[in-house]
Amino acid sequence: MRPHIKAALQSLLAASPDANANLQATLDALALGVILLSPEGRVVAMNRAAERLLAENGGLQAGREGLLAEHAADSARLKQLVAEATAAPGGAELEPAGVLTVSRRNHSPLHLLVSPVRGFHLDAKRPIRAVVFAGDPSHGVGPTNDTLRVLFGLTPAECRVAILLADGHSPAKIAEMVGVSRNTLKTQMSSIYGKTGTSRQAQLVRLLLQLPTTGRNVGT
């Protein structure tokens, strides 16, 4: 994921800074929760999926101190990841600050990915320094087309192949399922490896299973 987070965020935030309505529409189209944070780690904006997660009063809440988790240990780790993201030097190759699983009292844990972002602001008074992607496994298992498109720039056909790989299907079975030759599938998998910064199937599947999860969509 490391070589692609910067490009993914630039794509996600392409509506900045003079088209905030377009930005919000882009964010709201995602099933994955997206929370934009200030240099101090405070919540500046979020999409509808994130609003729903916070409204459930479990796992995450937004306050003056920024994002807080239900349990103290999770809050401490989340603050650490946000601090790392907001402190990342400008101009450096941006990488995810880390991945965190947040426990919830009455629901399955949330999966969070925290990433730094630079050169983006909603307006002159609201610079953005970090983005938190939040997924709820109870809404489905595994990555979605939206997640793979936003984070890695996969095409619809590549998204379908990646999701089927994450579901445990073999390349031979996937070629049969999607109706392509094995050579075509091999080419698609090579492209997926390049875009996700992986080099083999096991490494790719491990990465996909670590992503925040949302409701599934495997169609093209």
Image: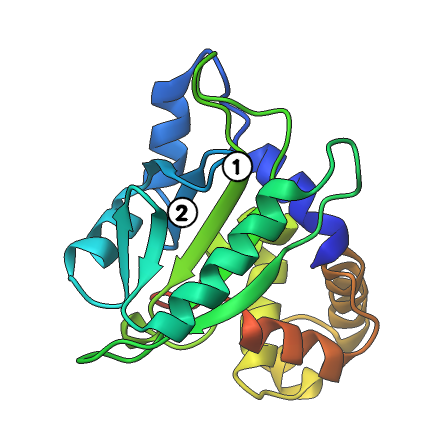
* Residue 96 location (% of width, % of height): 64, 55
Q: Amino acid at mark 2?
A: Val
Q: Which residue is mark 2?
A: 34
* Residue 141 location (% of width, % of height): 40, 77
Foreground of the two, 204 or 133: 133
Q: Residue at x 15, y 61 (%)?
A: 56
Note whether 50 is above or below 194 in the view shown. Answer: above
Note whether 27 is above or below 157 in the view shown. Answer: above
From the viewer's perspective, tell me whether residue 87 is left or right of residue 83. right
* Residue 180 location (% of width, % of height): 67, 70
- Which quadrant does the N terminus fall into? bottom right
| Element class at badge 2 | strand
Q: Amino acid at mark 1?
A: Leu
Foreground of the two, 64 or 92: 64
Foreground of the two, 199 or 95: 95
- Cα distance between the residues tagged 2 and 1: 10 Å
Q: Earlier in the sequence, mark 2 or mark 1?
A: 1
Identify the image quadrant of residue 201. bottom right
| Element class at badge 1 | helix
* Residue 72 location (% of width, % of height): 35, 71
* Number of numbered markers: 2
**Numbered label attached to residue 12:** 1
